[in-house]
Amino acid sequence: MSEGLQIREPLYKLLVRFGNGETNNYILTDPLDARLITPETRYVVVTSFLRESPSECTDVTVINVRDLTFIRTERVTLDQLTGERRMAGLRASSDDRLPKTLAQLKFI
């Protein structure tokens, strides 16, 4: 069994918006490098891993670049991440409010 990942700043929120208005959010450890997106890029592969067991892939999303309206990353702090996941009236430790998965990007 592998050891869990510790979340350290800087973190980046990846926002993917499709032509139909649907949006997906992911948490990354590295910012999006625009130089990796070339005119020949056809797909974005987003791979998500659990923090508790980073060797286990939980989700693989393949996105056709032609379906995207925009894709961007925004630098966020741990405080911002734990604050936006908080629901009124519910109490939880700060570790419970941290993201359960971290994602990685690859361009094809």
Image (cartoon, grey):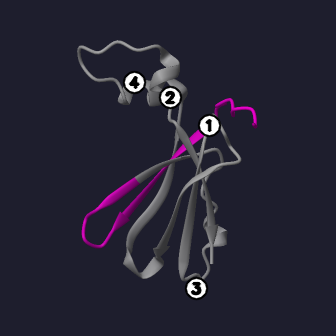
Left or right? Give the position of 72 relative to 6: left
Of the residues shown, which amino acid type is indicated by label 4?
Answer: Gly
Up/down of 3 relative to 104, above or below: above
Up/down of 40 relative to 77, above or below: below
**Labels in figure, total:** 4
Per the model, the C-alpha gap separating discs 2 and 4 is 9 Å
Q: Residue furthest bottom?
A: 40
Which is more foreground, mark 1 or mark 3? 1
Residue 51, which numbered label? 1
Which is more foreground, mark 3 or mark 4? 4
Q: In the structure shown, which secondary structural element does the residue marked by tag 3 occupy?
A: loop
Q: Which residue is mark 2?
A: 98
Decide: few, some or many residues near mark 1? Use Cα within 10 Å; few <14, some 14-19, many ≥20.
some
Q: Residue furthest front?
A: 1
* Quarter the N terminus occupies: top right
Q: Which residue is mark 3?
A: 39
Of the residues shown, which amino acid type is indicated by label 2?
Answer: Leu
Q: Position of residue 2 (x, y in %)?
A: 76, 37
Residue visible at 62% across and 78% down in the picture: 108
| First to last magenta residue range | 1-24
Q: Which residue is mark 4?
A: 83
Q: Say if mark 1 contacts mark 2, CB within 8 Å.
A: yes
Front-most of residues 57 and 89: 57
- First in sequence, mark 3 or 2: give its number: 3
Q: In the structure shown, which secondary structural element does the residue marked by tag 4 occupy?
A: helix
Of the residues shown, which amino acid type is indicated by label 1?
Answer: Arg
